[in-house]
Amino acid sequence: GHRQEVLAVSWSPRHEYVLATASADSRVKLWDVRRASGCLTTLDQHNGEKSKASSESANTAHNGRVNGLCYTNDGLHLLTIGTDDRMRLWNSSTGENTLVKYGEVCNESRKGLKFTISCGCNPEFAFVPYGSTIAVYTIFTGELVTMLRGHYSTVNCCVFQPNFQELYSGSKDCNILAWIPALREPVPDDISEKSLPQQHLNPAYEDAWSSSDDEG
C-alpha cells in the first residue's frame, strides 16, 4: 500500500470495484477492491521513462504530496493535484500521463483538496480551489478559463450539481456559495445564428459566473 497517509480517494464511475487513492507519499494507486492482493497500478508521471530498470514502487504521480483526485464523469480519465502546484490528467485504463499542461496550480493545502468536474458540458471543466478563488480549467486542453471570486478566505472544497449546472464552494470564511452560470440570451427569430459572434467556450462558463448572493 501507501507509505504515508492517504489524503484523497475516488471511486471509478466506470467500474464500481475500482478505487483510486492519493497519498502524501507522492503516489496515486488504483485498486480492485475485489482482490486481496496489491494494487492494479501505481501512476507514473514519467510514463515509465525513469523507472524502466526499476520496480513499479519507484513510480510517483507528483513531486509532492498528492492531496486531490477526481474521475471524469465517464470514468475514462482521472485528474490529480499535488503540492508541487501541478495538476495532471491520466488515462484511467492505461495509467498513462496525458501530458496536458495546466500551468502552475496553487495548492498550499496540507490536507485533502476537494475539487470537482462539470457534468453535461462541452467542453468539460475542472473547478479547483485556488487560494480564496476558484480556478476554472478546460480539462482536455488545460486552458484557464476564468477565476471565480467571492470568498474572503481559503476555499476548501467544490461540488458540482449537474441537474441545475450549479457549483457550490465551501471556504474557511464560514460561507457556502452557490455559483450560477450566465445563460445565453435567446436569439430573435429574425436574426440568423450565423450572424452572431462565434463562441469558442460554453457561454455558461465564461467569466460571467456570479454568486447567487449577487442575484438579490
Image (spheres, rainbow, N blue to C red):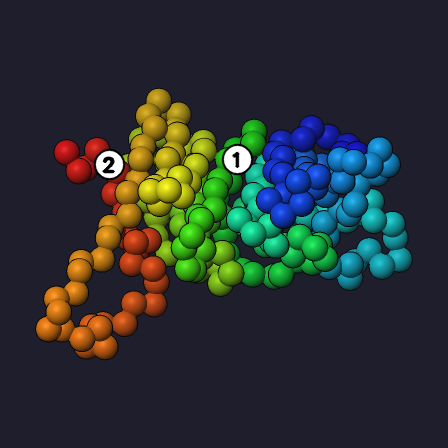
| Residue 4 or residue 196, whichever sits in front | 196
Q: Amino acid at mark 1?
A: Leu
| Residue 184 visible in this rendered orientation of the protein | yes
Q: Quadrant of the N terminus?
A: top right
Mark identifier at residue 113: 1
Q: Secondary structure at mark 2?
A: helix
Mark identifier at residue 169: none
In primary-sequence order, the first of circles 1 and 2 is: 1
Q: Is residue 211 above or below residue 195?
A: above
Image position, residue 58 (x, y; %): 81, 47
Q: Quadrant of the C terminus?
A: top left
Image position, residue 4 (x, y; %): 73, 30
- Work out which residue is located at the far top of the displayed protein and give it: 174
| Residue 22 in the figure: left or right of residue 143 | right
Q: Amino acid at mark 2?
A: Ser
Residue at the spot of label 2: 212
Q: Residue at x 18, y 58 (%)?
A: 185
Q: Secondary structure at mark 1?
A: loop
Image position, residue 13 (x, y; %): 60, 44
Q: Residue at x 63, y 35 (%)?
A: 9
Disc nearest the viewer among 1 and 2: 2
Please tell me in which quadrant of the rendered image residue 188 appears: bottom left
| Residue 155 in the figure: left or right of residue 11 | left
Q: Is residue 125 above or below residue 34?
A: below
Q: Is residue 13 above or below residue 170?
A: below
Please tell me in which quadrant of the rendered image residue 32 appears: top right
